[in-house]
Amino acid sequence: MINDLDLSNWKELDILTDDLWLFASRDKTGKHKNVYHGNFIPQIPYQLISRFTKAGEVVLDAFCGSGTTLYECEKLGRKFIGLDLNPQILDFVSSQMQKSKSDFYRLNSCDNTDENSRILN
């Protein structure tokens, strides 16, 4: 089984089953601030993480940006590895996670032109 979803009760799940996912508005709850260009609505990683991972598994986001996928992983109990080449946005995401009670995530600079690549958590 690729996820923790109980398909015998699929109508009660918070999973969209249509071919086209339509969202009335962007989820702005929790840590979602919409402060970074190119980020996407949190409902997309929520749907994908719920469908294709189990609690405790690791999700890799090679372009983590402002942390949208990380925040959904935190909500769903997944571990997270996030990479980005912008150290300022990594610092922002790290500051957003300071109040998190778990250490299930890692952020890392991935600018291959920078010899001082660093792990933030």
Image (cartoon, rainbow, N blue to C red):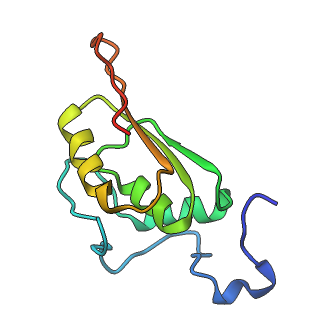
Considering only vertical position in the picture, is 49 above or below 82?
Answer: below
Give residue 47's quadrant in the image. Answer: bottom right
- Looking at the image, residue 115 sits to the left or right of residue 100; the answer is left
Considering only vertical position in the picture, is 12 above or below 76?
Answer: below
Q: Nearer the viewer, residue 104 or 28?
A: 104
| Residue positioned 20% across, 50% down in the render | 36
Measured as percent of width and height from the top left, residue 91 is found at 22, 41
Measured as percent of width and height from the top left, residue 78 is found at 57, 57
| Residue positioned 72% across, 63% down in the render | 3
Considering only vertical position in the picture, is 59 above or below 20?
Answer: above
How many callouts does the rendering have? 0
Quadrant containing the N terminus is bottom right
Considering only vertical position in the picture, is 100 above or below 85?
Answer: below
- Looking at the image, residue 43 sits to the left or right of residue 94; the answer is right
Q: Nearer the viewer, residue 38 or 106?
A: 106
- Looking at the image, residue 8 sits to the left or right of residue 50; the answer is right
- Looking at the image, residue 33 sits to the left or right of residue 72; the answer is left
Quadrant containing the C terminus is top left
Measured as percent of width and height from the top left, residue 39 is found at 29, 52
- Among all residues in the image, which is located at the extreme front? 101
| Residue positioned 37% across, 30% down in the render | 119
| Residue positioned 28% across, 15% down in the render | 116
Measured as percent of width and height from the top left, residue 14 is found at 57, 80
Q: Nearer the viewer, residue 60 or 40?
A: 60
